[in-house]
Amino acid sequence: MNWTTPDVTVELSANGVGLLTLNRPKALNALSLPMIRALTEALLAWQHDPAVKAVAIRGTSKHGDFGAFCAGGDIRFFHQAATGGDPALEDFFTEEYALNHLIFAYPKPYIAFMDGIVMGGGMGISQGAGVRIVTEHTKMAMPETNIGLFPDVGGGYFLSRCPGHVGEYLALTGHVIGADEAVAYGLADVVAPSAALPDAWAALQRLEAPDSAAFGAAWQDWMAQAGWRRQVGAEARLLTADVEAAFGEPTVPAIVAALQRTPTAGAERTLELLRTRSPLMLHVVLEQVRRARTMGLADDLRMERDLVRHCFQTAHLQRSGHSSETVEGIRALAVDKDHTPRWNPARIEDVTPEMVAPFFVSPWPAHAHPLRGLA
């Protein structure tokens, strides 16, 4: 099975490796609904085919076959669809989250080459991989609070499982991390030199194995022989103990107060970052991560599907379309590009529990939830 859509190339090598290439480099491979559908179609076709031993995914850049994995979902589409009432916006999130779940549950080795930008939706199509490869060029983040959104695509699930309170820090601030930090925090498995990726992609197509399990073992041996690193030292720690402890506080105002009591440059930078994010969504995201810590992936994705509906149609605040926090955040970052979002409320201290709690009430009964079929 080989085919090419405008933005995704799907190939099956002679030795039984499904090869997925995101090919929208001018947009840093931001995911569109047709891309999500192409990836889903390929993975469903391969998952029970005994001729397919493994799957690998990469993203092209303006420099070649690697260099920009995926910058996330197509936020310009989000803005256009939300302001224009396009029902495809609902389909996008339902199908994207179903794809994320499929990848996490995939029965065969799924290998993600996370070179370059790996953000938002790019994390959703890579965090479920059995082998997550990062390089010296990897720039990883879940930056959604910067656009009045939350770390979706299973972000509550995988960020909440980072050690300590690093997950809260990454979710609220959207801070960008590199390869060693990603491995240290359980968001990647192997650090490889970017220059070696073309040879690795070719090697995947030469390995012979009778089944998926044997192929997975053979690939692990290949990486070990290539000298790719699986462990990093303590120097990869992103946060000081004081800053990490602050993100263990029970509320966003308490986190801010703890950072204010911490007389370090790192605490000061973190405070400055938080003050640029959507105050409302900071409160929602903290609750999301805390709830997700005790959830399985399917329940987390259902919760996130509820949250994203409320982000674009915040009925309890009488806000939707142009007036929603998310549309305003995208406008400021990617449409008008004035980088001055008019957050409402404007201050962290003005957000009330009554504004936050309805985000976690599902707009659907359980039997009609769009992700009710996730196991």
Image (spheres, helix red, strand yellow):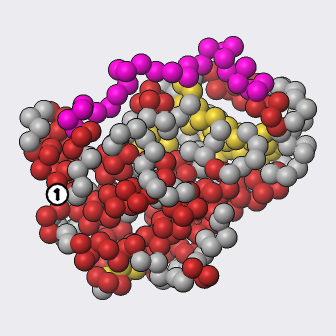
Q: Amino acid at mark 1?
A: Pro
Tag 1, which secondary structure? helix
Task: Look at the image and tell me whether residue 218 can be seen.
Answer: yes
Residue 100 percent across, percent down from the top left:
61, 56
Residue found at x 26% / y 66% = 280
Look at the picture and state if 15 lies above or below 157.
Answer: above
- On the picture, is 293 further left or further right than 215? left
- Which quadrant holds the C terminus? bottom right
Check residue 241 for magenta coloring.
Answer: yes
Residue 143 percent across, percent down from the top left:
38, 51
Hey, which quadrant is residue 110 in on the image? top right
Q: Looking at the image, how many numbered discs can be counted on the residues?
A: 1
User: Which residues are drawn in magenta?
Assistant: 217-243
Look at the picture and state if 220 lies above or below 4.
Answer: above
Mark 1, residue position: 253
Residue 187 percent across, percent down from the top left:
49, 38
Residue found at x 26% / y 46% = 247
**Which residue extends farthest front?**
294
Look at the picture and state if 203 lies above or below 117.
Answer: above
Would you call the spot at circle 1 few (<14 residues within 10 Å), some (14-19), or many (20 or more)?
some
Hey, which quadrant is residue 225 in on the image? top right
Task: Look at the image and tell me whether residue 139 can be seen.
Answer: no
Residue found at x 53% / y 73% = 89
Residue found at x 24% / y 72% = 353
Check residue 174 for magenta coloring.
Answer: no
Instruction: State the residue in front, 214 or 70.
Output: 214
Residue 230 percent across, percent down from the top left:
56, 22
